[in-house]
Amino acid sequence: MQVLIARTLNKILLLFGAVIIILFAGIFAARQYFPEYARWYLLAFVIISIALAVIFRYLEENWDKNIVTKMAKAGKIALVSIRGGKRLMKIRDTFFRSYWIYELEGDLYNGGHEKLVKTFQEKMNINMNDIPQGSVYVTYDEVNPRQIFIIPNALIGNLPALIPLVRDYENDKNLPVKYLDAHYNRGMVLQTFRSAVEKYRNRTGDTEK
């Protein structure tokens, strides 16, 4: 899904770029044939260009996050036990920040706790190397099974309506629930909680010094 989003964003960027180029070329035509309206055309060009840039930036930053939030609020989640992953492609945003799109694989447990072997894509922090093994919650809807995104732990904790679903998974002794720390930081970051605690201690230790 992340590859599809990245490719769609590229198409939108090309479309917006073409619109801006056409409008820019129209400035010269307005000056030549409609000089009395040239100033207003230039103002409209600036406003439209800024609006398109803001819209694209919003889509680039929030498209996947909005899907995650909407599906999580609707209770469309599942538990995934991640076994590993590999890098698919490197992408950059309009601020020239780089990300890795990973293909992750693991066992997904749906609402009935049936195990489904799944592969899905996630946009990860550029510094992610090895994918740790462990459990995360993902968006999942059997009607549209391609929309699988990792849900940050903080979002799970901030949605009380998900508590019964989470407890149901945790109380099932047949499921290998071993949570990973999942959070956004210029892409998704996955790490074991032991690694997260060690990094926190190192940062606080450096601060104290």
Image (spheres, rainbow, N blue to C red):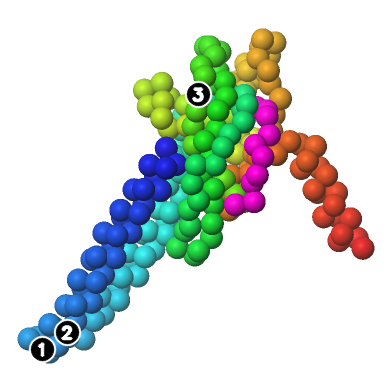
Disc 1 element: helix
Quarter of the image holding residue 45?
A: bottom left
Indicate the amino acid at tag 1: Gln
Quadrant that contains the N terminus: top left
Q: Residues within 10 Å of mark 3 (few under 14, many from 20)?
A: some
Indicate the amino acid at tag 2: Phe
Q: Which residue is mark 2?
A: 28
Q: CA distance from mark 1 to mark 2?
A: 6 Å
Quarter of the image holding residue 205?
A: bottom right
**Looking at the image, residue 136 lies above or below residue 152:** above
Quadrant that contains the C terminus: bottom right
Instruction: Tell me if 118 is positioned left or right of 84 in this view.
Output: left
- Residue 121 point in image, percent of width and height: 49, 37
- Residue 73 point in image, percent of width and height: 49, 33
- Residue 147 point in image, percent of width and height: 43, 32
Residue for point 38% across, 42% down: 4
Residue for point 80% across, 48% down: 199
Q: Which residue is mark 3?
A: 118
- Residue 148 point in image, percent of width and height: 47, 32
Residue for point 20% across, 71% down: 22
> Mark 1 near mark 2, Cβ–Cβ under 8 Å?
yes
Quarter of the image holding residue 194?
A: top right
Residue for point 47% across, 58% down: 93
Q: Residues within 10 Å of mark 2 (few under 14, many from 20)?
A: some
Q: Earlier in the sequence, mark 2 or mark 3?
A: 2
Q: Which residue is mark 1?
A: 32
Q: Nearer the viewer, mark 1 or mark 3?
A: 3
- What range is drawn magenta here? 126-135
Q: How many marks?
A: 3
